[in-house]
Image: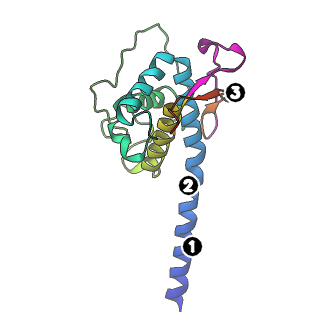
Amino acid sequence: MTTTTGEGRRRRRGRAGEKDMLIAGIDTSVAAIEWTLSELMKHPRVSKKVQKELENVVGKDNMAEESDLDILEYLDMVIKERLRLHPVAPLLLPHESMEDCIVKERFVCSDIDLCGRDFQLIPFRSWRRSCPGMKLDLTMVRLVLAQLVHCFDCELPDGTLPNELDMTEHFGIVTCMAKHLLAIPTNRLSKS
């Protein structure tokens, strides 16, 4: 009888752990999507390049699917750059460059790993301290972004220019935008 009770408790704890991981992943995923969309709106040339890649891989008559994600190399580079610029779970105190510098496209022709194995980009920490929801988060964020960018063109409201977009961070357990992104979407896919 003790074994059954112990098994029941372990099963309940396991289900609670699954819920905790999903709930914890929602805030970080939403912040990641918002940061990436904001950066794409701030850089329309990059956004058009992502849309072009989606048109080539997915087509204008289809929705992006999970099976397309491994082929979307430019979207992957955009997400890595967003992870570098705006990690949603900060590791250290905020920092900034003391001097002006020119930054090249660091993820082109690069196999920088997000798992922290080479320590060049560690948004999910590394090894034993790595985020258990990393794969789920990356899949969810990549799929939602692919679908949003592929299906819609977005404009900022009230004639706001991309360079006027407020990218101020609000620090907490999750680093999100101080002022949430407001955008007006218009359909860009051909209707079937």
Pointer 3 with pointer 1, Cβ within 8 A: no
Find the magenta span and give its range. Answer: 153-173
Q: Amino acid at mark 3?
A: Lys
Dot 3 falls on a residue whose secondary structure is loop
What is the quadrant of residue 104 in the picture? Answer: top left
Dot 2 falls on a residue whose secondary structure is helix
Is 123 situated above or below 51?
Answer: below
Q: Which residue is mark 2?
A: 22
Q: CA distance from mark 1 to mark 2?
A: 16 Å
Q: Observer-nearest residue: 6 or 114? A: 114
**Residue 171 belongs to magenta span:** yes
Is 13 situated above or below 151?
Answer: below
Mark 1 or mark 2: name the one nearer the start of the chain.
Answer: 1
Q: Is residue 93 visible?
A: no
Q: Residues within 10 Å of mark 1 (few under 14, many from 20)?
A: few
Q: Observer-nearest residue: 192 or 88? A: 192
Dot 1 falls on a residue whose secondary structure is helix
Mark 3 or mark 1: name the one nearer the start of the chain.
Answer: 1
Q: Position of residue 136 (x, y in %)?
A: 46, 50
Q: Which residue is mark 1?
A: 12
User: Residue lying furthest front in this view?
Assistant: 192
User: Residue at image x 64%, y 13%?
Assistant: 164
User: Residue at image x 41%, y 46%?
Assistant: 66
Q: Position of residue 69 (x, y in %)?
A: 38, 41
